[in-house]
Amino acid sequence: DEVRQIGELIDDVLFLSELESGRELVALGSTVALPILEEVVQGLGESAARAGLTLRAEGDPDAELPLRPRMIRVIAGNLAENSIRYAGPGSTFTLRVGPGELIASDDGVGVAEDDLPRLFERFYRADRARASRGTGLGLAIVKHIANSAGGTVEAQGEIGSGLTIRIAFTGP
C-alpha cells in the first residue's frame, strides 16, 4: 500500500509539473462531457461501493467543456476520488455538467468553512483528511487544469452539509 501511495504521489507531482511547464495542452477545442463523466463514474464504482458512496453523472447530454477528453477524465476522476475518500459512508456524489460548467457535489460530512479557501493548495489537507490516503494534489490539479483552460474554480460547503465544487468556463 505504501509503495502504491508513493507511486501515486510521484505521478501527481509529475503531472502537475508537466501542466505547469506548458508541455501538456489542456484546452483543444471542446468536448461533449457527459459520456466521459459517465465513464469515470462507472470506472470508480467498485471503489465507491467499498467506501459506501453512491456516484452519479448527469446533466445536459450536449454540453461541451473547453477541454480535451483526457483533461475532463482527470478533473472528474480527481473530484470523485476526493469524495470517495472524504464524504463518508451513505453519501451521494454527483458530477453535473451544463453549458460551460461542471459541478461536483456530495452530501457528505463536508468541510470546515475555514478550510474552503485552501482546498486547492498543493499538499493542503484539512485536519479530518490528514489520516486518510491521498497525495494532497488532486484538487490542485483540478484547479490548474481549469485555470489553464480559462476557467474558475470555487468550493462551497460546511461541516455536515457536504461539499460543492463548481468549475465555470467563460466563452471564447
Image (tube, helix red, strand yellow):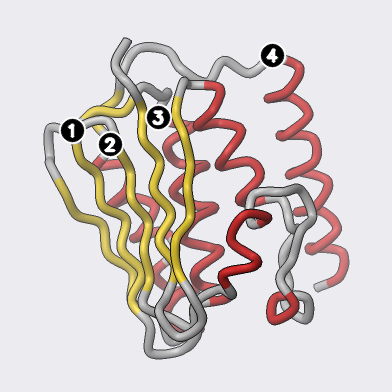
Disc 2 marks which amino acid? Ala
The residue shown at (44%, 61%) is 156
Quadrant, the C terminus: top left
Q: Residue at x 41, y 24 (%)?
A: 67
Residue 18 vs residue 117, the one in the foreground: 117
Neighbours of disc 4 within 10 Å: few (<14), some (14-19), many (20+)? few
**Residue depth check, mark 1 versus mark 2: number of the one nearer the observer:** 1
In this view, 65 is above or below 12 = above
**Residue 69 has which mark?**
3
Residue 160: percent from the left, percent from the top?
45, 85
The image position of residue 63, as x and y in percent, is 18, 33
- For label 3, count other residues whose C-alpha is less than 10 Å away and answer few (under 14), some (14-19) or many (20+): some
At label 1, which amino acid type do we have? Ala
Residue 34 higher or lower than 111, as above or below = above
CB contact under 8 Å: marks 1 and 4: no
Tell me the tag on residue 63. 1
Residue that numbered label 4 is attached to: 22
State yes or no: discs 1 and 3 in contact (Cβ < 8 Å).
Answer: no
As measured in the structure, the alpha-carbon distance from the residue carrying label 4 to the one carrying label 3 is 18 Å
